[in-house]
Image (spheres, rainbow, N blue to C red):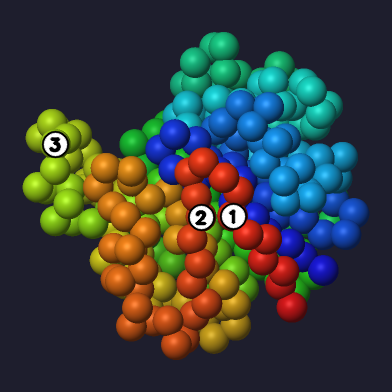
């Protein structure tokens, strides 16, 4: 059995759960430890199964709760040295375990593959997590899908896929012009259309579930994201990750 759940997903905080019968890991801890544990309890996910926390990059919405969570649960935090050194000092975990983007990390039966990507951070990595013959991908905070992302994405049985903004809503919206350019840049975020293209061209036949993730509160809506993905709904099971509550749990077959 392999279960996945978006504990939190959005610019206010991100946290993704991947677990089997005995072990589990989290990708990012961008909300408070209290909220992570509350949301896990609401979905009956046991924090005692957690064996490690992996950090994608140093932005607060991805590691705000990392230090406290690691100390509370006595679990290691895997992070690159560049990410650690560029994080705010009060967010840095006490006992980091450094990895390089080319490493494969073995934790609790999982093989975790860092995926170096394009984003405005020191050394941003997405992750592909393999357990037996199943692969789970966490692909958010990506300006554009490079070949590295495409290669790992195509191997996945389930993914958390960024669908951050609707282009019209972004350009017609209230964000300052420099921020609009940053969001839409090659080091920003994936739009609904870019997410559609990545899924359409590189989603494999074995892909069981796609959680649309990291939706912007101001420049997107669940309705817009789903509407964009509608032509792919017969090929893929498309679900939504939420900002203020954990998603449903999806069990891989």
| Crowding near the residue tagged with mark 2, few <14, some 14–19, many ≥20 C-alpha atoms within 10 Å | many
Q: Which residue is mark 3?
A: 174
Task: Give the camera-side residue of 193 and 9.
Answer: 9
Residue nearest the viewer, comparing 118 with 221: 221
Q: Is residue 173 left or right of residue 9?
A: left
Residue highlighted by disc 2:
241
Residue 73, relative to residue 237: is it above or below?
A: above
The x, y position of residue 45, in whole percent, is 78, 49
Q: Write the residue at 79% across / 50% down.
A: 44
Q: Residues within 10 Å of mark 3 (few under 14, many from 20)?
A: few
Residue in the image at 69% along x and 20% along y: 68
Q: Which residue carries the number 1 mark?
A: 247
Q: Residue 210 placed where, x, y %?
A: 52, 68
Q: Is residue 25 visible?
A: no
The span from disc 2 to disc 3 (Cα, nearest Å) is 24 Å
Q: Could you tell me if residue 136 is visible in this image? A: yes
Residue at left offset 88%, top offset 59%: 21
* Quarter in which the N terminus is drawn: bottom right
The secondary element bearing badge 2 is classed as: loop
Of the numbered discs 2 and 3, the one sitting upstream in the chain is 3
In-image side of 133 versus 36 (left or right): right
Labels 3 and 1 touching (C-beta < 8 A) = no
Q: Secondary structure at mark 1?
A: loop
Give how far apart the Cα atoms at labels 2 and 1 are. 5 Å
Callout 1 crowding tier (Cα within 10 Å): few <14, some 14–19, many ≥20: many
Report x, y in % for residue 53. Answer: 70, 38
């Amino acid at each position: 059995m392999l279960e996945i759940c978006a504990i939190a997903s959005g610019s206010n905080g991100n946290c993704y759960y991947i677990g089997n019968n005995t072990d589990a890991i989290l990708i990012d801890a961008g909300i408070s430890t209290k909220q992570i544990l509350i949301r896990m309890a609401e979905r009956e996910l046991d924090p005692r199964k957690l064996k490690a926390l992996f950090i994608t990059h140093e932005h607060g919405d991805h590691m705000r709760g990392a230090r406290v969570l690691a100390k509370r649960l006595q679990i290691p935090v895997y992070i690159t040295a560049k990410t650690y050194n560029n994080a705010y000092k009060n967010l840095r975990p006490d006992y980091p375990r450094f990895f390089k983007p080319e490493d494969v990390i073995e934790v609790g039966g999982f093989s975790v593959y860092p995926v170096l990507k394009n984003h405005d951070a020191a050394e941003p990595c997405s992750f592909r997590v393999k357990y037996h013959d199943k692969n789970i991908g966490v692909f958010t905070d990506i300006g554009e899908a490079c070949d590295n992302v495409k290669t790992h994405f195509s191997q996945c049985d389930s993914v958390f896929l960024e669908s951050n903004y609707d282009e019209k809503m972004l350009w017609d919206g209230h964000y300052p012009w420099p921020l609009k350019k940053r969001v839409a840049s090659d080091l920003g975020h994936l739009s609904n259309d870019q997410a559609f293209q990545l899924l359409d061209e590189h989603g494999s036949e074995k892909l069981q579930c796609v959680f649309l993730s990291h939706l912007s509160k101001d420049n997107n809506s669940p309705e817009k994201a789903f509407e964009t993905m509608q032509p792919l709904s017969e090929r893929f099971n498309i679900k939504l990750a939420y900002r203020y509550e954990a998603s449903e749990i999806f069990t891989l077959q």
